[in-house]
Amino acid sequence: MEGRWQGEWISDANGHRGALKCLLTKTESGEYQATFYAVYARFLSVAYSVPLHGRQIGGKLKLEGQPDLGQLAGGIYHYEGEADKTEFNCTYRCKYDHGTFQLKPLR
């Protein structure tokens, strides 16, 4: 499941959406690091890294985490998702927004 992913994020709160890329790597401690590169409002690019706890269940990698991205970005985010060899889907929510990521492997 490690590697590069691409797709889009979609806000269920306001309907906004944008391009999204992710580099998912396993750390030495066995946890995962997801570095996201997102486009907002078609021209604003942001990049941020999120530590995620992962566990294998039935051929899928279940991921979850609650990083604090800072007050300006919305504070504490709650991520919950799963990945296999063909897709990485995740929900997110914070004080101001909630939605989904839908990603496919970048080839």
Image (tube, rainbow, N blue to C red):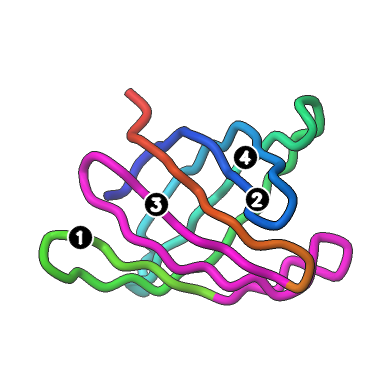
In front here: 104 or 96? 96
Question: Dot 3 lies on which element?
Answer: strand
Q: Is residue 11 left or right of residue 30?
A: right
Of marks 1 and 3, the one in the foreground: 3
Q: Say which mark, if any, is on residue 89.
A: 3
Mark 2: give few (<14), some (14-19) or many (20+) Cα within 10 Å.
some
The total number of labels drawn is 4
Decide which of tag 4 and tag 2 comes sooner along the chain.
2
Question: Dot 2 lies on which element?
Answer: strand
For the residues marked 3 and 2, what is the alpha-carbon distance in whole angstroms?
A: 14 Å
Q: Residue furthest left?
A: 58
Q: Which of the 4 image quadrants contains residue 44? A: top right
Q: Circles 3 and 4: CB distance less than 8 Å?
A: no
Spot occupied by residue 100 in the image (x, y as percentages of width and height): 53, 53
3 shown above or below 89: above
Amino acid type, mark 1: Lys
Residue located beneath label 1 in the image: 60
Residue located beneath label 2 in the image: 11
Decide which of tag 3 and tag 2 comes sooner along the chain.
2
Decide which of tag 3 and tag 4 comes sooner along the chain.
4
- Magenta residue span: 66-94
Decide which of tag 1 and tag 3 comes sooner along the chain.
1
For the residues marked 4 and 1, what is the alpha-carbon distance in whole angstroms?
A: 23 Å
Query: Magenta span has 81?
Result: yes
Q: Say which mark, if any, is on residue 37.
A: 4
Q: Circles 2 and 1: CB distance less than 8 Å?
A: no
Of marks 4 and 1, the one in the foreground: 1
Mark 3: give few (<14), some (14-19) or many (20+) Cα within 10 Å.
some
